[in-house]
Amino acid sequence: MARPPYEYDPYYLQPDQDRNLINTLFVSGLPDDVKAREIHNLFRRRAGFDYCQLKYTGRGNQEAPTWGIGDIGERLPMSGAEVVAFATFLNHQSAIAAMHALNGVKFDPQAGSVLHIELARSNSRRKRKPGSGPYVVIDNRIKASANTQETSSDDGDSDTEEPSGAEDADASNKDELKTVKSDTVQDPENSVPAANEQLERTIDEGAQACSTLFIANLGPNCTEYELKQVLSKYPGFNMLKIRAKGGMPVAFADFEQVEQATKVMTDLQSSLLPSSDRGGMHIEYARSKMRKP
DNA sequence: AGCACA
C-alpha cells in the first residue's frame, strides 16, 4: 500500500505548478474616484488573495468607452481616465473562486457601478520588497490632468509590472509617464470611514464572517471522517456535520473563533480531498453559526 | 450554485 505520504495531508494554498495558469483578475467597472484601499478591501477577505494594484490608464475622455452600459442596462460613469484594477491570488483556483464571488456585484450603490471581473491576460509580477504595501497604484494618466490623491513620494521602484488587461486597453501609451507608488501600509480596518461601511455591506452581503464554515463541491464519496482529518489540524476546530442535500454532500464546520474559521477557509479554499471528483472544495462562511449541541 | 442542526 505505497501511496504518497502527502496524499492525505491538507492541501495548502500553494503556487500553481503550471506558471501559465492565470492567477490575476482584471477588474473594471470601477468608479473613477475609487481608492486603492477600496480595491484591497474588496478582495482582502477572499481566500488565497495576495495583493492588488489599481491602475489609471492614460486614455481618457475622447476614446470610446470599452463599456458604457452595465450588465443590467445601467449607465456606468465614464469620465476622465479609466481606472482598472488587478487582483493577484496565490493560485488559479482561488482567483477563479473570487471572480465568481465578486463579478457583477454592485461596487458603488450610489453611482450604480457594477464590477466586471475576468481573468487577466497575464499574471502580475511584483518584486517582493520588504515594506511594500498590500496594494499598489499605477498612474498612467497624462500629467496635466489634475492629480487627485495618492500623491506619496515615488520611491523609484520601476520593477512593478502590470499585467495586461483582458481588453488590451493600454497597449498605446507604454512607458510614458509611468509612476508606481507603494502606499504606506496603514491598517485599513481602522482607517475606513463611513463611506466604506456601505461598500463592505454591499460586497459582503451573504458572506458575513461567521465561525461556522459552509463547505461545498465535495465528491459524492466524501466522508465526515476524511474531512475531519483535515479540519482537526486547525486550532479552534469544534465539530463537523455532513449533510447530503439532494445528492451531493455539503458540510458545516464549526470553529471557536471567526478568525480561526477564516484561516481554514483561506488555507483550504479550492483544495482537493482524496474523494474529490469535481475540483476543489468551495468554502464560504455559513449563513448562521452552528447551533450548540 | 448548493446553507442544516433545533
Image (cartoon, rainbow, N blue to C red):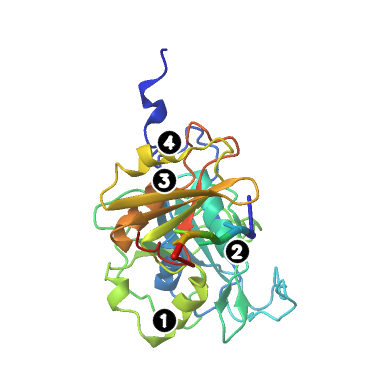
Q: Output the chain of dot 4.
A: A
Q: Output the chain of dot 3.
A: A
The residue tagged with tag 3: helix, strand or loop? helix
Looking at the picture, which amino acid does disc 3 mark? Leu
Confirm or deny contact between disc 2 and disc 4 (CB under 8 A): no
Label 4 to label 3: alpha-carbon separation: 14 Å
Sequence-wise first label, 2 or 1: 2
Looking at the picture, which amino acid does disc 1 mark? Glu
For mark 3, what is the residue?
Answer: A268
Looking at the picture, which amino acid does disc 2 mark? Asn
Label 2 to label 4: alpha-carbon separation: 32 Å
Q: Nearer the viewer, residue A149 or A172?
A: A149
Q: Nearer the viewer, residue B1 or A134?
A: B1
Sequence-wise first label, 4 or 3: 4
For mark 2, what is the residue?
Answer: A103
Q: Output the chain of dot 1.
A: A
Q: Nearer the viewer, mark 1 or mark 4?
A: 4
The residue tagged with tag 4: helix, strand or loop? helix
What residue occupies the far right of the structure in this picture? A73
Q: Are marks 4 and 3 on the same chain?
A: yes
Q: Residues within 10 Å of mark 3 (few under 14, many from 20)?
A: many
Sequence-wise first label, 2 or 3: 2
Sequence-wise first label, 3 or 1: 1
For mark 1, what is the residue?
Answer: A197
Label 3 to label 1: alpha-carbon separation: 28 Å
Q: Quadrant of the N terminus of chain A?
A: top left
In the drawing, does residue A200 fall left or right of residue A133?
right
Q: Position of residue A127 (x, y in %)?
A: 35, 48
Q: Quadrant of the C terminus of chain A?
A: bottom left
The residue tagged with tag 2: helix, strand or loop? loop
State whether residue A36 is above or below residue A131.
below
